[in-house]
Amino acid sequence: MVDFDFKDNYDINDLLKIMEILRSPNGCPWDKVQTHQSIRKDFIEEVYEAIEAIDLDDSALLREELGDVLLQVVFHCRIEDEKGNFAFGGICDELCKKLITRHPHVFGELTVTDEGEVLKNWDSIKKQTKGQETYAETLESVAKSLPALMRAQKLGKRAMRAGMDFENAKGAFECIRLETDELEKAMEEGDKAHIEEELGDLLFSCVNTARHLDLDAEEVLTKASEKFIKRFKETEKLVDLSGADMKALSIDELDAYWRQAKDRV
């Protein structure tokens, strides 16, 4: 039994102590051998589970999932603390200073009139504090680990700040037409590398169109995926009711069931 003060209610200091114990020589065999790389995917999964709790509007689940996200923060922090690089207090200190610096309209004398000015000032201050001298550097700073659609939308938004953008959604949509034609030509050529390139351009154009329509491409595709699942489920249900086997049907026969499903859901 480790030396630990059991309580009815714990706080962040207790959490930090628990993580220290788990990572100690006499701690948990699993926890003490983990690295940033070994638990990297866990961090991603926990964030997505917290997002799902938000989408479900489930406060109890959100409280649990935010705790799991905090655990990942504390876990990674402990690994760095053991290396002598930084401790949890350093994270809090840097974050507080960042928030104060980027909110001069709250903690300083700057006056803003609306949300747009707040975001404009935030971007300007962020660029200065990160030492970014060119617009290209702001694009390069967008994390490559982001989901591709989300990253593409952020890239388009940052390019827009440099004036490199379509005038409106119609212009962005027209680019979809052009990229579709180029993809079709690449498919006719049969060059896989060229097909991949043109398909990527088409997807990027779709993201730009979503941005100009004030839509989030990631959310749009997520909703489309959910709709596909519902219609597939209904299609399978209709096939089962007919006594047929989905795998034994032709694509034309399945398409007929799919059209029926579309009328239902």
Image (cartoon, rainbow, N blue to C red):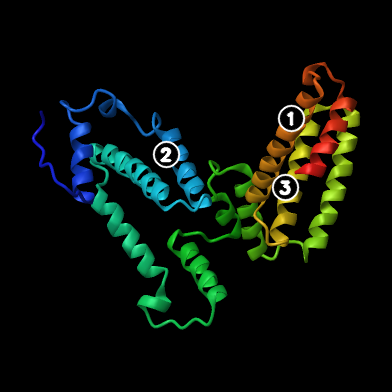
Determine the residue located farthest toward the left in the rendered image: 3
Tell me the quarter of the image containing the N terminus: top left
Task: Kindly report the distance in space between the C-alpha atoms of the residues bearing marks 1 and 3.
Answer: 35 Å
Task: Kindly report the distance in space between the C-alpha atoms of the residues bearing marks 2 and 3.
Answer: 27 Å
Residue type, label 1: Lys
Mark nearer the N terminus (2 vs 1): 2
Which element carries disc 3, helix, strand or loop? helix
Which element carries disc 2, helix, strand or loop? helix
The numbered mark at residue 204 is 3
Q: Residue at x 89, y 43 (%)?
A: 181
Q: Residue at x 46, y 59 (%)?
A: 131
Which element carries disc 1, helix, strand or loop? helix
Q: Would you place residue 132 above or below residue 22 in this image?
A: below
Front tag of 2 and 1: 1
Q: Position of residue 259 (x, y in %)?
A: 85, 37
Q: Position of residue 156 (x, y in %)?
A: 66, 56
Q: Residue at x 51, y 73 (%)?
A: 118
Determine whether, in the image, residue 208 is placed left or right of residue 97: right
Q: Bin the neighbour count of mark 3 within 10 Å (Cα to Cα): few under 14, some 14-19, many 20 and up.
A: many
Q: Position of residue 22 (x, y in %)?
A: 22, 32
The numbered mark at residue 43 is 2
- Is the C-beta separation of discs 2 and 1 under 8 Å? no
Residue type, label 3: Phe
Mark nearer the N terminus (1 vs 3): 3
